[in-house]
Amino acid sequence: QYYPMVDMDTCIACGACALSAPQVFDYNDEGLAYVTIDNNRGTIAVPAPFVSGMLDAYDGCPSASIQIQKSAFNNCQHK
Ligand code: F3S
């Protein structure tokens, strides 16, 4: 199981992640990415059909702002 979360402090709003995984990522008013399924809390595992796109987004992020854990994050970074 994969729990993704965007580090919105390092995201440079490049816009690649939601192209790879539109079911998982979207952008706020500033163009910064966040995980839609749990409002970037890192508390909900990505549904199986979307995992491969999410991993593509992870690999493709130029600022390495997508973090992935195998269990839920404890912190809260949504904006
Ligand atoms: Fe930001 Fe990386 Fe997505 S820079 S917009 S999290 S691809």
Image (cartoon, grey):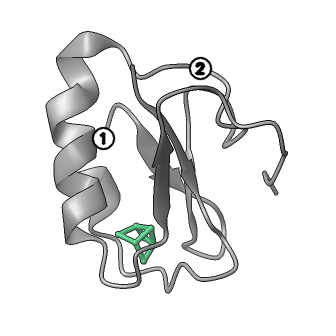
Observer able to see residue 20: no
Q: Where does label 1 land, which residue?
A: 22
Residue placed most toward the observer, 74 or 11: 74
Placement of the N terminus among the 4 image quadrants:
top left
Relative placement, left or right, of 60 versus 37 is left
Residue at 37% over, 81% down = 14
> Of circles 2 and 1, which is in front?
2
Circle 1 SS class: loop
Relative placement, left or right, of 75 versus 63 is right
Residue at 41% over, 22% down = 46
Residue at 35% over, 13% down = 47
Distance from label 2 to label 1 (Cα)? 16 Å
Give x and y (percent) for residue 22: 30, 41
Give x and y (percent) for residue 44: 59, 20
Q: For residue 30, what is the image quadrant?
A: bottom right
Give x and y (percent) for residue 56: 16, 52
User: Up-down: is 17 above or below 30?
Assistant: above
Three-letter amino acid code of the residue under disc 2: Ile
Q: Which mark is residue 44?
A: 2
Residue placed most toward the observer, 71 or 9: 71
